Amino acid sequence: MGKPLLCVTVTAATTAELRRRRDEATAADLVELRLDALRDPDVMGALSGRKSPVVVTCRPRWEGGEFQGSEEERQRLLAAALASGAEYVDVEWRARFDDLTAGPHAARVVLSMHDFEGVPDDLTSKLRAMRSTHGGFVKVAITAKRLIDCVALLDLAPEARRSGRLVLLAMGDYGLTTRILAGRYGSAWTYAGALRSVGQITPKRCRTNTGSRRSATQPGSTASSAAPFGIPCRRRCTTRRSAR
C-alpha cells in the first residue's frame, strides 16, 4: 500500500463556520466534517463547494461525540451525506445502521469503533467481526494509557497493510506514535486537528514530524486519479524513519 493520507478534522457550531474551516484545511488530503456539534446541521451546506474529499462524521455522545438528537435523526443525516455524494461517511459499529453499512453505498462507509477505556482484550476478534460484515474501510481507535498499549495495534499492522482499508489509531498522548508513524501501523490515513482530548496534533506538527508530499491516489486504490469526484489529494503523511 502507499503512504497514509492526512485527514484533518474540523468542527464548528454552525454549518457556515464548518464550511469555512473546511476550506482552510489546505494541508489535508481528506477533511473530516464533524456534524455532531452543529446547531444547524445541513448536509448539503457542509458539502457544497468543497475542493478536497471529505469524511462526514456525526458522532453520538455514547461514542465520544456531541450529537444530542435521536439515533433516527443521526442516521438520516448520515444517509443524506451518502446520497449527496460525500466521499466517505463514518458510521459507528455499535450503531448497527445496517442500511448504511450493507447498503448500496457501503464501499464509502468507514465503519468505526472507539474504546475510551483502554485496549479491549478481544481487539483482534472485534476487528475481524467488523471486517466480516463490511467490505469498506474500517477504523479502530483505542485509548493508550502507556506506550506499550500501542503494540496491540502494531500486531494488527500486517493485516492492515494487506487490506489497505484499515485505520488503526490510539487516542491520548501515548498514542502519538500511531498518528505520526501511521504507515508503520498500516493505516490508510492518519488524523490531525484541534481535538486535543483524543490526542490530535495540528496538521503543521504532523507534517513537521512526518514530512509530506503531493499524492495522486486514493486510500485503498491503485488508480492514478484521486478522489471519486476528481479532486486530486494534495499530500500524504510519510513514514520516513529519519523524520521521527
Image (spheres, rainbow, N blue to C red):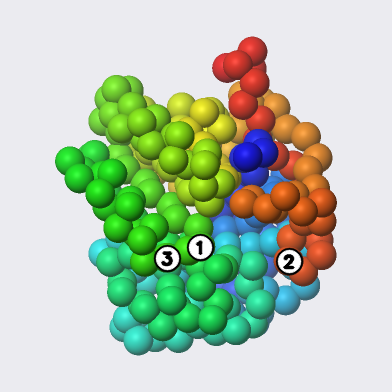
Q: Amino acid at mark 1?
A: Gly
Task: Answer with left or right where residue 195 lies relative to residue 142.
Answer: right
Contact between marks 3 and 2 (CB within 8 A): the answer is no
Residue 134's disc number? 3
Residue, disc 1: 136
Numbered disc 1: secondary structure? loop
Quick check: 188 left or right of 90?
Answer: right
The quadrant in which residue 104 appears is bottom right
The residue located at (43%, 76%) in the rendering is 102
When the figure is inspected, residue 134 is found, relative to residue 27, above or below; the finding is: below
Residue 173 image point, x, y percent: 38, 31
Marks 3/2: CA–CA distance: 20 Å
Mark 1–mark 3 distance (CA, rounded to whole Å) = 6 Å
Q: State which tag comes first along the sequence, 2 or 1.
A: 1
Would you say the residues marked 1 and 3 are in contact, meaning their CB atoms lie under 8 Å apart?
yes
Identify residue for label 2: 228
